[in-house]
């Protein structure tokens, strides 16, 4: 009871003090009024910001909806284009079955040409006379010969020989190659079982090797890059040479396991390579097949970027390009060491089908064929040629 009386006494004293100080009361009222004004301003700003946010959200939703519709439209267009391309490829396959190219398995038709002697009326075997003033105009036809499990590899014949033997490099590094007595043995369902295994004295690296006039020319990568000349008949090393280029880099960005790619044409033996000194452009060198000496070297304007492989025909380098997303392969850069044809004059040549990336392409001068390995498929491309002077 005494505490309550003391509290009331204190409250009464405070009330009397406030009533006796009107200026203090006015101060409190002004502060409250200022607080109310600031609250009103904050409320108005909040309402405005909320309205602007709703408008912005509605605009974003409208844009997202429009983008979704545009994406659906583009997806439909892409699916339509894909279906049309597939239909065209099916039609091309159908036409090819109705009008097939001469089979690549028949030895009499593909690897040996026959002529009739006017005097004796007798058929004889001979090589086709090849005019080295020709260049590629288009891919005339293709034939899938086999499909092996290995995505990358090399298969070829002796590019300047009557031999029917076929050689397979399964993968991008090993010390053993496979030799088939004839093409029909490779196409057999038994895979590599019918092949003769040839163990090399040094392991090979990449897919830039070739068989030329009875010798296997292949690349060794240890301890440095070497070109090995191996006698296939005697199973011995006939010669070897260090490759003279320094600071070598992969010659094709899409097949980075290739540092030196050997090629053969009507004029001889070539090496395709790249170095840091040449600003990421492909280089070309001519080799002496007997001594492996470098006879001449060229810096070409063909870029390494998006290149997947290359080959040489009549002294002209053809570089095949693709994309990282694996589109249709195309010959997009041409370099003629004689300067007869420029890259602008050369036709843009597309390969007829897409699988993956050509890990190897080898040109056969005697047949005008390309032997290619594309995503595990062993393919033969027949070429349409034209005189350089007619371009």
Image (cartoon, rainbow, N blue to C red):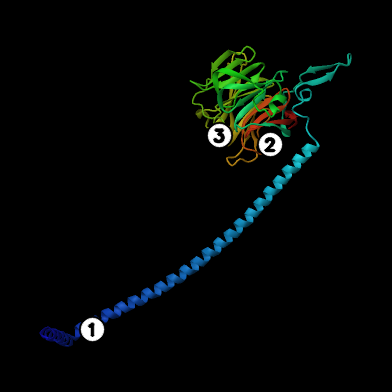
- Which badge, 3 or 1, is on the more N-terminal residue? 1
| Residue 336, visible in the rendered structure | no
Q: Closer to the observer: label 3 or label 1?
A: 3
Query: Marks 2 and 3, Cα distance to the nearest angstrom?
Result: 19 Å
Q: Quadrant of the C terminus?
A: top right
Pointer 3: what residue? 253
Pointer 1: what residue? 26
Q: Quadrant of residue 189?
A: top right
Marks 1 and 2 close (CB-CB < 8 Å): no
Image label count: 3
Q: In the figure, 379 relative to 198: above or below? A: below
For mark 1, give the secondary structure: helix
Q: In the figure, 30 relative to 372: above or below? A: below
Query: 97 or 41, which is in the foreground?
Result: 97
Q: Is residue 101 shown left or right of residue 323?
A: right
Q: Are there few (<14), some (14-19), or many (20+) residues within 10 Å of tag 3?
A: many
- Give residue 331's position: percent from left, percent from top: 65, 34
Pointer 2: what residue? 351
- Which badge, 1 or 2, is on the more N-terminal residue? 1
Query: 366 or 152, which is in the foreground?
Result: 152
Instruction: Indicate which disc residue 243 carries.
Output: none
Q: Is residue 271 shown left or right of residue 28?
A: right
- Give residue 327's position: percent from left, percent from top: 63, 41
Q: In the figure, 377 relative to 123: above or below? A: below
Query: Marks 1 and 2, Cα distance to the nearest angstrom?
Result: 94 Å
Q: Closer to the observer: label 1 or label 2?
A: 2
């Amino acid at each position: 009871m005494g505490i309550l009386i003391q509290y009331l006494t204190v409250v009464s004293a405070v009330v009397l003090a406030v009533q006796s100080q009107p200026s203090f009361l006015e101060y409190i009222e002004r502060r409250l009024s200022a607080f109310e004004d600031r609250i009103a301003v904050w409320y108005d700003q909040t309402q405005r910001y909320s309205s602007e946010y709703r408008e912005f959200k509605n605009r974003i939703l409208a844009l997202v909806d429009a983008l979704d519709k545009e994406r659906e439209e583009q997806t439909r267009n892409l699916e339509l284009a894909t279906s049309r391309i597939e239909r065209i490829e099916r039609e091309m396959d159908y036409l090819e079955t109705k009008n097939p190219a001469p089979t690549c398995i028949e030895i009499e038709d593909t690897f040996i040409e026959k002529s009739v002697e006017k005097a004796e009326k007798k058929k004889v075997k001979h090589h086709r006379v090849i005019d080295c003033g020709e260049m590629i105009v288009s891919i005339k036809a293709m034939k899938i010969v086999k499909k092996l499990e290995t995505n990358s590899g090399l298969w070829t014949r002796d590019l300047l020989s009557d031999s029917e033997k076929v050689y397979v490099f399964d993968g991008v590094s090993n010390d053993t190659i496979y030799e088939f007595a004839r093409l029909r043995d490779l196409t057999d369902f038994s895979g590599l079982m019918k092949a003769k295994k040839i163990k090399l004295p040094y392991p090979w690296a990449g897919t830039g090797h070739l068989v030329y006039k009875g010798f296997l020319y292949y690349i060794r990568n240890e301890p440095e890059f070497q070109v090995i000349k191996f006698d296939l008949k005697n199973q011995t090393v006939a010669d070897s040479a260090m490759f003279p280029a320094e600071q070598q880099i992969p010659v094709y960005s899409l097949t980075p396991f290739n540092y030196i790619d050997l090629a053969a044409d009507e004029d001889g033996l070539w090496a395709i390579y790249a170095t840091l000194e040449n600003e990421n452009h492909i280089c070309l060198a001519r080799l002496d097949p007997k001594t492996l000496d470098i006879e001449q070297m060229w810096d070409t304007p063909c870029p390494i970027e998006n290149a997947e492989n290359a080959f040489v025909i009549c002294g002209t380098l053809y570089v095949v390009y693709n994309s990282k997303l694996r589109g249709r392969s195309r010959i997009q850069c041409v370099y003629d060491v004689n300067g007869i044809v420029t890259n602008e004059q050369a036709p843009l040549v597309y390969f007829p089908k897409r699988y993956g990336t050509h890990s190897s392409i080898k040109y056969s001068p005697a047949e005008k064929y390309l032997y290619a390995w594309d995503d595990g498929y062993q393919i033969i491309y027949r070429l349409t040629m034209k005189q350089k002077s007619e371009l």
